[in-house]
Image: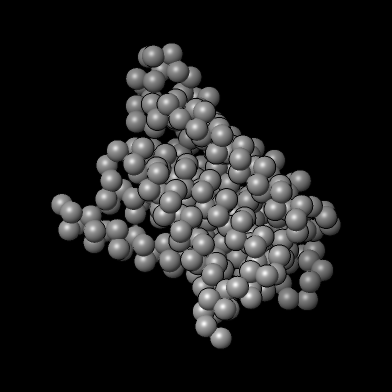
Amino acid sequence: MSLMDNLKMYFQYPFVRYAMIVGILIALCSSLLGVTLVLKRFSFIGDGLSHVAFGAMAVAGVTGLSNEMILVMPVTILCAVLLLRSGQNAKIKGDAAVAMISVGALAVGYMLMNLFSTSSNISADVCSTLFGATSILTLTLTEVWVCAVLSVIVAAAFLFFYNKIFCVTFDENFARATGIKADVYNLLVAIIIAVIIVLAMNLVGSLLISALIIFPALSSMRVYKSFRAVTICSACLSVFCTAVGILISILSGTPVGSTIVAIDMAAFIIFSLAGAVRR
């Protein structure tokens, strides 16, 4: 069978369409806030919150919750708020607060999975949670709708508060001088990132989420210089790389998360070369 015939055959199955829809939505949301995080040097927050989400997911699995998002979402948002507050405390710097919370959550989650797990293969469970699994290909229609609604909320919040986020990203002191409540918008960014990370857990795993947020933004910055151009390019590039990664994963049987990140890395190299040639 030709490549197109294979793709037509696979897209006849609902789980493939669901995976593609969810992947594209998550990629779009991740890229929108990725530019802000990179410019504000908050890239490490995504990594820290992903570890928190792993710990919360372990607790949800131990307690037997049928819907893990009920626990994982509020815990991750709460930790995003705590990281923001701790980062503003002179006694605990931002990078130290992230390291403290993320490593602690990762250790506690792994310990709970070992002590109370009902699975016979703990290593496989941990590996699939950290690096992504085939759970993206077993999504239900309800999960797709939940992801779609949350993605629309994230995108709408970014577009509605675009000017405020732009000001806070580049100069918080100037933003405060003009009457913008910078702390409120920093908190909004942290909460949105927490929501994105929870949504992306099934797609790329907790350890690879930062790549989904950072790589498209960094790639776009190699070529474009304005905030708007970088944001638009980052969104388009993230959606393209995620769609290609999912298709390659389905056709070749490779891990979904790792394949998407590999495509993002290849795009970064291409954009870096293009930026060098342009300069």
Q: Quadrant of the N terminus?
A: bottom right
Location of residue 236 in the rendering, given as x and y in whole percent from the top left corner: 43, 51
Q: Is residue 10 above or below residue 96?
A: below
Q: Quadrant of residue 51?
A: bottom right
Q: State the colouring used for the structure image.
A: one colour
Q: Residue at x 34, y 41 (%)?
A: 229
The mark tally for this picture is 0
- Nearest the eye: 99 or 120: 120
Task: Name the side, left or right, on which 264 lies relative to 252.
Answer: left
Q: Residue furthest bottom?
A: 1
Residue 174 in the image: x percent, y percent? 34, 20
Residue 33 visible: yes
Residue 149, percent from left and from top: 67, 42
Residue under the image location 48 percent in, 35 percent down: 87
Identify which residue is drawn at 27% across, 42% down.
225
Which is nearer the eye, 111 or 139? 139
Residue 59 in sight in this render: no
Image position of 5 (left or right of 35) = right
x, y percentage for residue 75? Answer: 68, 43
State the residue at coordinates (68%, 70%). Answer: 12
Compared with 57, 79 (above or below) is above
